[in-house]
Amino acid sequence: MSNFQLPGLLSGIDTKTLIAQLMIIEQRSLKIYQQRKVLWEEKKQALSILQAKLMTLRNSVQALSDSQDLRTFNVSSSDSDILTAEASYNAFEGNHAVVINQLATAERWVHTNGLEYAEDYIDDEAGTFIYYYNNKETTITTTATTTLEDLVGLINNDADNPGVTANILYHNDSYHLVLNGNEAGSDYQIFINASNTEVWEAESALTANGNNATLSSKIIDLDQFNGTLAGNEKILMIDEEHNKDHNGNVISMELNITSNTKLSHLISEINNAFDGRAIATLVNGEIRLMDNTCGTSQMELTLSYNPGSGSTTLDIPVISQSTQGGSITANLTGFAVSDFTKTQSAQDSKIKVDGYPSTSAVAEVQHLSFTDEATAGTFTLTYDGQTTAAIDYDATLVEIQTALEALSNVDSGDITVGGDILNNNNGTMTFTFRDTLGNVSLISINPSSLTPSDNSNYVMTEYTKGNDGWISRSSNTVDNIITGVTMHLHDTTDANGEELTLTRDVGSVKTKLNSMISSYNAAVSHIKEQTEYDNEQKKAGTLMGDYIVSTIQSLLNTPFITQASGFVENIDTFLTPGHIGLELDKDGVLSLDTNVFDEAIAQDYMDVLALIGADKTGSSTSNTVKFYSASSDYTTAGTYDVKVEVNGAGAITSAKIKLSTESTYRNATYSGNVVTGNSSFDDNGNPVYPENGLQLSVDLSQEGIFTATVRVKQGFAGAIEEALDQILKTTNGPLEIDQEHIDKNIDDLQDKIELEERRLTQRETRLVERFARLEKTLTLLQNQMASLAYFDL
């Protein structure tokens, strides 16, 4: 009997190859899953590239979406070593002649009594040094071991340093303390005081919407204000018993309140009333008044509100003394004001622009009127924070003038004293200032040591306001003379001055448009590439059939082929991007016809900028109901119909609004003379109504029902930006939803792949085990057959 044999390791069967072939058949589902995953990953990659291109487009569109930013100017100077400038959106083309008579300088004081070494002790006992700068007073306390170097460190490292830098000057074998003001201009003088100055502060802050009020806060917007203005409301300094300067001279003030009156106006009026004898500021919403003269003071400030014939209320916080003048003495030996020399005065820059001011200098004249004869005693005069020595009641005019010229801030000839002396009955003493000094602080008199000593007997007034014939600013950077232009003064000029030339920077608008066109075309090209069918390769684009991507392309195209929102024919010069040269070809490629654009710019520059970047700007057909503001984020651009009813008491009783394309009006809210559109939001944080954030002002002086057509304009760049903002939203945005859908499919396929891989691993294991058993069985059979053959022999 012949031997029975099977191929294999022992049996003659190639089980490894057989298992591999069986597994290939088993892997068909896995490969399908893997192929599908690759397709979804390609979609994800395509969407990621699209998202990046759309973000680039949004950045380029944002540079165009505000017409104010587009309105830029090139500024040139006839001599940039003397004068340079830059312009903002609200400037105007043209040439300006600028004459610079004087540059602003910072104040500098040098200690005249130098020390042999910088490490020498400044005093053999503890002391106090007090200086005043930028409406703040600083007290420095020293010890017996404080060196000159230590004093410099104490000043410079003081957390309350108001802007003074101390250093050491080595001169004539001595070391001297130097105090430098960090800011230029007459508002930044340094005073070295013999004692502290008096401060009055409000006991609580004025607030607006719960926050500390600022100088720009309107009186009617303060939380402390209630009611509707009738038209004759005022803020007053109560009476002569409660409003005085350092020497007890009576101060008065009256500020009429309108809907536009700000806290800055109130602070300005207080400062005008004190005329340099004290300085009012607003600190964290609190009114603060600081004396301009150190020592014991009679200064007081009390404000009251008069509602006139109306019923409004304004709770002005009580203003009281927070720091008593003269309560701290400066006793650091050798560091009194007489021990310092002012080597450079803080002075303003002085310029003329286009020949203005055209008037010649006017000398300031102040009058001291008195109604009774002084018969005994002495008096002092205070000017710009410095006080004269005691002057006899019967001093001559020359003696009084000499006493003023002894002050460190008065040069010989600065002030001429004339008129009557105090021991005359019912007289007037005159103080005439040098005309180059311009408008100066009011001199005040302290008659407390005179007979009679009643302050009411001596009244100082500004008879003629000084004007030096120049525009003065406390800086060499001047931004509030030529509208929209910031000038930088570097040197003085001759009488002809230097010329500034402003021209439109049209090139920057073209550059920004071309940047948008480039990024737009890149995004559209990517969409086209990923959504079309390739006939040559017989392959569909990765994103073909993706509804969201198709919608994105439509959203991007629409602003270029439709009329801009809020723009109206026969009112606006240009209505569509095509009117200024932006064109889409049949393939959706965007381009700019520069000839058309240049012609449009020449025809109506402002309307071109508006068509590109109007940012919810508005207008109204009514003189009673006027556009006030709109929200860039929430107000829908378009044309609105408005109805407002005002009663005989000057109050709004009804306000309604709708888009002109709608049939039904909605109620608007109103407060005072301001009407606000419905500002409701849905659960996703989107405005429910198009008028969200739209505000209108109403003239309440007339009774009746008033209608208005209000236009809110938005340029095409803003429309594209809004569309992109919606597309690129990270929460519930269409692109984000599409990406989440793709990620979910990838995750699901990955789960199936991993499950299938586990199944295949198990299947392969079972096959190996099965064929191993088969091998074992066949091997056993083969051995048995061999045994049988042996016995047959």
Image (cartoon, grey):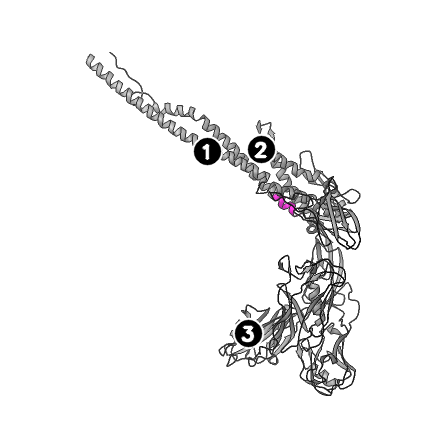
Q: What residue is drawn where x is 26% and y is 18%? A: 782
Residue assigned mark 2: 543
Q: Please identify the quadrant where the N terminus is shown.
A: top left
Q: Nearer the viewer, residue 495 or 477?
A: 477
Residue assigned mark 3: 140
Q: What residue is drawn where x is 55% and y is 37%? A: 739
Identify the main secondary structure in magenta: helix
Magenta region includes residue 62: yes
Residue 418 location (% of width, % of height): 77, 82
Q: Nearer the viewer, residue 382 or 423?
A: 423
Residue 420 location (% of width, % of height): 78, 83
| Image: magenta residue range | 56-64
Residue assigned mark 1: 751
Q: How many marks?
A: 3
The residue mark sitting in front, 3 or 2, is 3
The residue mark sitting in front, 1 or 2, is 1
Q: Please identify the quadrant where the C terminus is shown.
A: top left
